[in-house]
Amino acid sequence: MVPDSVYRYRILQFAGAAAALLFLIELIPSPAIAQTPSSAPIIKRATPSRDPNTVGIVAGGAEEGALRFVNEISRVVAAGQETGPNGELALRVLPIVGRGGVHDVRDVLSLPGVDMAIIPEPLLTRLQESKELGDLKGRIVYVTKLINEELHVMAREDIRHVSDLAGKPVNLGDYGGSVEHIARDLFRTLGVKVSEAHLGREEALEEMRHGRVAATAFLASQPAANIERLTGDGGFHLISIPLPADATLYLPTSLRHEDYPKLIPIGEKVETVAVGTVLIAYNWPEKSTRYPLLGSFVEAFFSRFSEFQATFRHPKWQEVNLATTLPGWKRFKPADRWLQSSQARQPSTAATGSVTQPAISRTPAMEGRGAETERLFEEFLQWRERRGKR
């Protein structure tokens, strides 16, 4: 005979287990939701924020180079602002660590706290063409084109050319990340079929040391100090990645000894490709609370852009022209208005349509970087002329 107290305890225990099971079932998507195609429209709604003066910019994974630039945007925008009684800012930029690539675009489309992202242009083009996330042109606008990132392919000593990677394991980073998209597209275009691995950066380098991975790809703005720090003592080297003849979304460039003295001998360079990046934003309705907040961000970012070009910041900032357009995409209206107003204040730019950046004093280091930009542009013109003769 089971005592009543034990009987009641077992009933309560069963009821608790049943409630927990029902809770877990609620978390599991129904078949209808689980089978929804990825091209289904993503609906984003603004929700009340604990800090209504904060805009969020997702900048890829912790290992990706864009995060540094978002951190610098956050610091410059915050500097010089008057704070409230509790230290609150009139405008705060929150850097957000994401997963990179398509994941960051999806976050902009769906997460209320994510207003913007830095995305490689080729990825944005592919997503629009494939409609993987639906038609983006009504839901995404761009603020400005930003820096170029270079593809770095670090390989073991026995790998001398990109063709040596055929059939070998090559790390492309996270699934759906920017590196995966760029490197996969280039390897396919070059006719090099690799065995893809998807590992974290340090894990991939450890696998290379044990001979289980042949190479790993990085997408970063040179000079990227962490690349030498992580790989300088591993017996690895950077290999050249030629620009495919029919590639229209990439630019030819090179990595130099001056940028990577431990990896590239004096006087030598490693040919590779560069991709442009763009700061995109969710196309909030003009009457929404987020729209004027993004407008305030544009005003702060654009009007103080000269501060990003200081010599102690990354030299890539000096290559940015805020007025450069992204063909086929709409610019965020407040950004467009700011540029038009700036152009109107500078009549001499009317003939070219370009907008001069706020003036700052030039230094020898900046002059050297400007000469390097001109050199790369000349290389690009020569490459385009050679391709036209084929």
Image: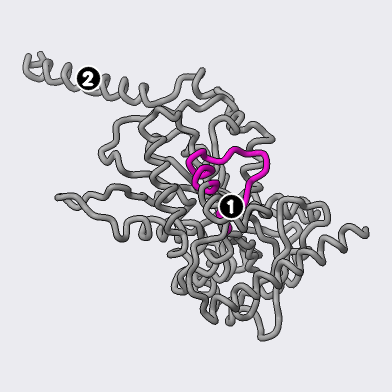
| Residue 324 in magenta stretch | yes
Q: Residue 61 or 286: which is nearer the viewer? A: 286
Q: Which mark is residue 14?
A: 2
Q: Which mark is residue 323?
A: 1
Q: Residue furthest bottom?
A: 266
Q: Amino acid at mark 2?
A: Phe
Residue 216 position (above or below residue 46): below
> Where is residue 203 shown, x and y percent of the image?
51, 62
> Where is residue 215 shown, x and y percent of the image?
64, 64
| Residue 214 in magenta stretch | no
What residue do we see at 45% from left, 70% from top?
A: 310
Mark 2 vs mark 1, CA separation in Å: 66 Å
Q: Residues within 10 Å of mark 2 (few under 14, many from 20)?
A: few
**Residue 261 seen by the camera:** yes
**In front: mark 2 or mark 1?**
1
What residue do we see at 49% from left, 21% from top?
A: 33
> Where is residue 74 shown, x and y percent of the image?
37, 56
Q: Which residues are magenta?
A: 321-340
Decide whether the magenta segment is chiefly helix, strand or loop: loop
Q: Residue 351 or 52: which is nearer the viewer? A: 351
> Where is residue 227 shown, x and y percent of the image?
54, 70
What residue do we see at 40% from left, 49% from top?
A: 96
Q: Residue 92 or 192: which is nearer the viewer? A: 92
Residue 115 position (above or below residue 1): below
Residue 269 horizontal side relative to residue 220, left or right: right
Q: Which mark is residue 130?
A: none
- How did the renderer colour the structure? one colour
Q: Residue furthest right?
A: 390
Residue 136 horizontal side relative to residue 229, left or right: right
Q: Residue 200 or 390: which is nearer the viewer? A: 390
Q: Amino acid at mark 1?
A: Ala
